């Protein structure tokens, strides 16, 4: 399956097919010199499969996880790119999860004021959500994704075979973003999680999410309106993620709890809770409300004294609401 994404910045293809990694170089074609970025959590066999297709290319491998998503790693990648004489027509290829896509994408966005980059996601989170749409960022000063750029990829190769190597907690972590897309845009997608053996429908789940994301990003590349709906659960979710830090909950797990916290409709909340429990994901946690509130005030959707949040009263129909900060704070105390 091929999905065309047409944005003002770039027009590119997202290919979704099993076995793509083996033939990546033939699909990528000629793109100047190639520079590979990956993380050590990606199975060595995947890295070797790509490296063998580009024997001349340098590969920068950083330690896996959110602790690497910072300006230090970004600077090290840029320095290495310079040392390998990468030019404006050369291409960065990211092989890894969301952090790799962010690091490689943000490095490509800044290097020589922007060079091409190609994404080969290896996690459910990256396949479903972060590999397309052009959001690249690092965490800074304790605030998630606070420094970054919109920089669209030139090609995305989604190979669900790679998920076989993913630990089950990571798999579910990414699938929470698909639950989010079902709740905000696609009742049939939510129904897969509610009623079916969702692990038998992984390819369909990814395809539905990519199509939703393509439609949203094409309408609103820089998140002026409808794209904000993709942030359902992220207002509390990002704050919890920052609050618990590197050894706490995963991103998707925090988004799941964030959706539970923001949702008003008790019946929908009950259904979401049942889905999250099916996926062995947490539905709530204990935290210091004041500390989480302070983190929440840095939300990119915040405008001085209010935050644009996403609400879902009917499955498939997310909408935006402006919530004053005191209302968000009060809920933290009464959840
Ligand atoms: O692509 C988007 O737009 C999204 O909001 C997708 C989110 O699921 C994703 O976690 C995103 O990185 C959060 O964006 P941010 O702007 O709050 O950093």
Image (cartoon, rainbow, N blue to C red):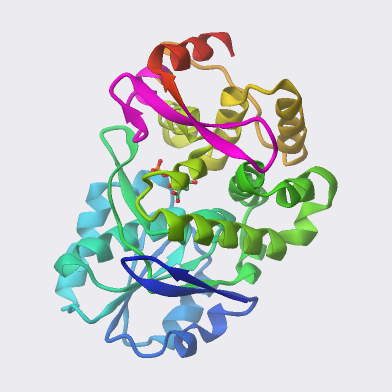
Position in image of residue 203 (x %, y %)? 69, 65
Find residue 210 and report its image quarter. bottom right
Name the quadrant of the N terminus. Answer: bottom right
Q: Camera-side residue: 316 or 252?
A: 316
Position in image of residue 206 (x %, y %)? 63, 61
**Can residue 293 be seen?**
yes
Q: Camera-side residue: 44 or 329?
A: 329
Q: Can you say whether 107 is above or below 322 in the image? A: below
Find residue 77 and report its image quarter. bottom left
Who's the residue at 43% across and 84% down the image?
Answer: 28
Span colored in magenta: 293-321
In the image, is 240 to the left or to the right of 107? right
In the image, is 71 to the left or to the right of 300? left
Position in image of residue 155 (x %, y %)? 43, 74
In the image, is 325 to the left or to the right of 281? left
For residue 319: magenta?
A: yes
For residue 330: magenta?
A: no
Who's the residue at 45% across and 86% down the image?
Answer: 25
Position in image of residue 208 (x %, y %)? 65, 60
**Can residue 155 be seen?**
no
Q: Can you say whether 77 is above or below 261 in the image? A: below
């Amino acid at each position: 399956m091929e999905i065309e994404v047409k944005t003002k910045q770039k027009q590119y293809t997202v290919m979704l097919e099993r076995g793509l990694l083996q033939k990546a170089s033939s699909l990528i074609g000629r793109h100047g010199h190639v520079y590979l970025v990956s993380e050590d959590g990606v199975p060595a066999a995947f890295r070797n499969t790509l490296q063998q297709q580009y024997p001349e290319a340098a590969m920068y491998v950083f330690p896996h996880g959110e602790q690497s998503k910072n300006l230090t790693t970004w600077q090290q990648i840029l320095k290495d790119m310079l040392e390998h004489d990468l030019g404006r027509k050369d291409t960065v290829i990211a092989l890894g999860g969301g952090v790799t896509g962010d690091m490689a994408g943000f490095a490509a966005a800044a290097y020589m004021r922007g060079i091409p980059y190609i994404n080969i996601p290896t996690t459910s989170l990256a396949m479903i959500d972060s590999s397309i749409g052009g959001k690249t960022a690092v965490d800074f000063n304790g605030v998630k994704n606070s420094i970054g750029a919109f920089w669209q990829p030139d090609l995305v190769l989604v190979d669900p075979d790679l998920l076989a190597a993913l630990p089950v907690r990571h798999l579910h972590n990414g699938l929470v973003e698909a639950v989010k897309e079902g709740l905000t845009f696609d009742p049939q997608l939510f129904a897969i999680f509610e009623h079916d053996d969702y692990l038998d429908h992984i390819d369909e789940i990814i395809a539905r999410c990519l199509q939703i994301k393509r439609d949203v990003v094409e309408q609103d590349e820089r998140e002026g309106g409808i794209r904000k709906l993709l942030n359902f659960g992220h207002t509390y979710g990002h704050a919890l993620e920052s609050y618990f830090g590197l050894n706490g909950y995963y991103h998707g797990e925090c988004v799941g709890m964030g959706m539970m916290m923001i949702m008003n409709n008790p019946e929908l909340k009950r259904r979401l809770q049942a889905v999250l429990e099916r996926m062995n994901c947490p539905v709530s946690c204990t935290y210091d409300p004041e500390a989480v509130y302070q983190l929440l005030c840095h939300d990119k959707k915040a405008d001085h004294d209010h935050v644009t949040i996403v609400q879902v009263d009917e499955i498939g129909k997310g909408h935006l609401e402006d919530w004053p900060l005191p209302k968000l704070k009060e809920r933290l105390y009464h959840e």
